[in-house]
Image: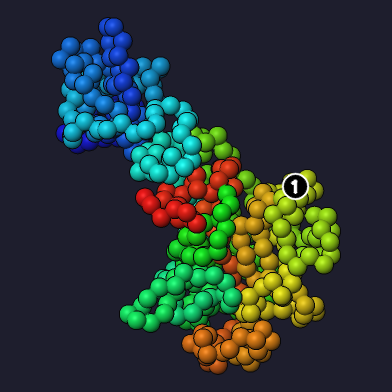
Amino acid sequence: MQRILSSQLPAHVGATVRLAGWVHRRRLLKSVAFLVLRDGGGLAQVVVTAPAVRAQVEALTEETVVEVVGTVVANPAAPAGVEVVEPTVRPLGPPAVPPPFDLYRPVLTAGLSTQLDHAPVALRHPSRSAALRISAAAVSGFRATLDGQGFVEVHTPKVVASSTESGANVFALDWFGRPAYLAQSPQFYKQLMVGVFERVYEVGPVFRAEPHDTARHLAQYTSLDVELGFVADHRDVMAVLRDTLAGMVATVADRADGALATLGVTVPEVPAEIPAVHFTEALTIAGAPPSEPDLAPAHERALGEWALREHGSDFLFVTGYPMAKRPFYTHPDPARPAYSNGFDLLFRGVELVTGGQRLHRHADYLAALAARGEPVEPYAGYVDAFRHGMPPHGGFAIGLERFVARLTGAANVREVVAFPRDLHRLAP
């Protein structure tokens, strides 16, 4: 008999079926016992009346893996309106050691640190696994949208010879006796691949050795990177980003509707045109001094509230950041060279995306590095490619975990990561 999932039970009323999963909960009443089985499809209620089977169920522990064979009957009070009766129950392994928290409760009562210490079992709770389902759907929407626009997925090295962002903190390692670093970004490589495919994207890990210990930072996270050629300026990049976000949100709504319901979340609407303000205007809106070189988290929150109040939008572009706060490969605004053709996208008052137009002429790279007192040699393999003809281009990077955290309303980005890596955590 082929195994089915609990979610398939309504289609098998009156039939004998085989289920397999984890003992989610047992309810031992005087005349009847209930075994709630959890599998990849959800929960199934199994009704036990036979004394021998009841004795088996009483001996089980929560999270023990079992197989159940029984008859499906309708019951409006049961999960999905059906339950399994007259079962046989067979353990598929030894009795499980129960985790240090109850997975059958609607909310995990353990603190986040305890959950992360016991992540392999904490992630079984619907509230934790729901966030991962949403993350998977978001990546699927990201890929599908870009595939539909002629982009090619690429895979670039995660061990590099020099840091991507000059002056930033990197994780150093030994590469057969030579110094090397974990990549902070696929930035250089995705630009070079524009010279091959014109439009490329990548889904992969990036590493930041910045000693942030906040609810929004990780030392390793998943970056959704995009780069496209033959742009007029950064606004072409922003248009692709808008469409990509719309595709991600639509796929989450379609493929992760159950996970959204579990968390009580509704997806935001991505406007046909996301409102945009120049950095100088953003400072005024946020009540920041005009001399501020960047936006602080408090400024981002104020801008998020303004965008929702004035435009009914959860999203806001801030364009024209000062060149002094952008990487050397950023293209300046031709009309205001002190400001960049770069942007950030705020999602509900938190920076989600950084992007912009890049330099594409070899001479401009040499001048940009010289202006910052940077030697060319560490970047020679990257900069040299621009001698061989590169189109005007630009791109962006979305932090996947931060997107899911803002979408679900998680207080800490670690709540939506399976096994987070941060300033303090290297295990499990």
- For mark 1, what is the residue? 305
100, 146: nearer the viewer? 100
When asked about the image quadrant of residue 318, the answer is: bottom right
259, 80: nearer the viewer? 259
| Residue 52 visible (yes or no) | yes
Give me the residue at 53% from left, 85% from top.
379
The secondary element bearing badge 1 is classed as helix
Instruction: From the top left corner, tell me how far across and down residue 175 is, in percent.
Output: 36, 78
| Residue 258 visible (yes or no) | no
Above/below status of 79 relative to 230 = above
41, 230: nearer the viewer? 41
Q: Count up the numbered dots.
A: 1
Above/below status of 98 relative to 257 = above
Q: Is residue 49 left or right of residue 29?
A: left
Q: Is residue 37 left or right of residue 88?
A: right
Instruction: From the top left corner, tell me how far across and down residue 109 is, in percent.
Output: 47, 31
How busy is the neighbourhood of tag 1: few (under 14 within 10 Å), some, or many (20 plus)? some
Q: Is residue 185 left or right of residue 125?
A: right
Q: Amino acid at mark 1?
A: Glu
Image quadrant occupied by the N terminus: top left
